[in-house]
Image (tube, rainbow, N blue to C red):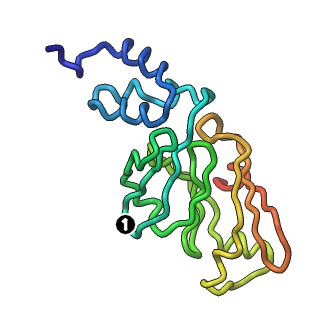
């Protein structure tokens, strides 16, 4: 019997480039540690037609469940402590996460890469709000959208829709966030 861990990297890259479903790509990465370098985002066709995974609601632990529409069941459970007690808004394979009156992050759930954004208090201070009652904070942020996928470029804009006494849109660029 052949040792799967000893397959040539070039062959694994060719196989990875032919995987079209994200669940299968995740499973491909999990076969053995020597396969992970071949299963990178560069080797996965993000533009091919895919049925999305739906992230289920937080259960107050460090794990998130993902429901597969194509399989009709929970297909993946990920250790994702970065998402505990956070509101999550999806954009392609990224999540915009919002903690309870603390911070905004972009989170890639499969690589667990995080990009820290402004604090919610800073967003509210831009509009002249010093303090918002904690029970009202989730009613303020309505939606977050990225102009492009941060996996492809660092030149993206984050748009946040929120409501105080009127509706607002705030635009953030990475240059503003990092310096």
**Image point (68%, 49%), residue name:** 174
x 75%, y 55%: residue: 159
Q: Position of residue 23 (x, y in %)?
A: 44, 37
Instruction: Give the residue at x 26% y 30%.
Output: 32
Q: Is residue 113 above or below residue 171?
A: above
**Residue furthest toward the right?**
166
Q: Work out which quarter of the rendered image holds the C terminus and state it.
A: bottom right
| View extreme (front): residue | 72
The spot of residue 124 in percent (x, y) is 73, 74
Q: Regarding mark 1 in the picture, which secondary structure is present there? A: loop
Left/right of residue 138 with respect to residue 60 in the rendered view: right
Whether 49 is drawn above or below 179: the answer is above
- Which residue is depicted at the point 80% across and 75% down? 127
The residue tagged 1 is 61
* Residue 126 placement: quadrant: bottom right
Q: Nearer the viewer, residue 50 or 25?
A: 50
Q: Nearer the viewer, residue 108 or 114?
A: 108
- Total label count? 1
């Amino acid at each position: 019997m052949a040792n799967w861990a000893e397959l040539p990297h070039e062959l694994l890259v060719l196989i990875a480039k032919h995987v079209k479903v994200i669940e299968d790509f995740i499973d491909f990465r999990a076969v053995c540690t020597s396969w992970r370098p071949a299963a990178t985002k560069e080797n996965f066709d993000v533009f091919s037609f895919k049925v999305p995974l739906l992230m289920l609601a937080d259960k107050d632990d460090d794990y998130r469940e993902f429901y597969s529409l194509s399989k009709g069941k929970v297909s993946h459970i990920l250790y994702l402590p970065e998402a505990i007690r956070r509101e999550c808004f999806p954009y392609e394979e990224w999540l915009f996460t919002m903690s309870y009156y603390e911070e905004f992050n972009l989170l890639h759930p499969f690589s667990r890469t995080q990009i820290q954004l402004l604090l919610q208090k800073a967003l509210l201070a831009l509009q002249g709000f010093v303090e918002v009652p904690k029970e009202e904070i989730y009613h303020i942020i309505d939606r977050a959208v990225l102009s492009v996928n941060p996996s492809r470029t660092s030149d993206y804009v984050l748009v946040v829709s929120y409501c105080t006494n009127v509706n607002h849109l705030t635009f953030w660029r990475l240059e503003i966030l990092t310096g």
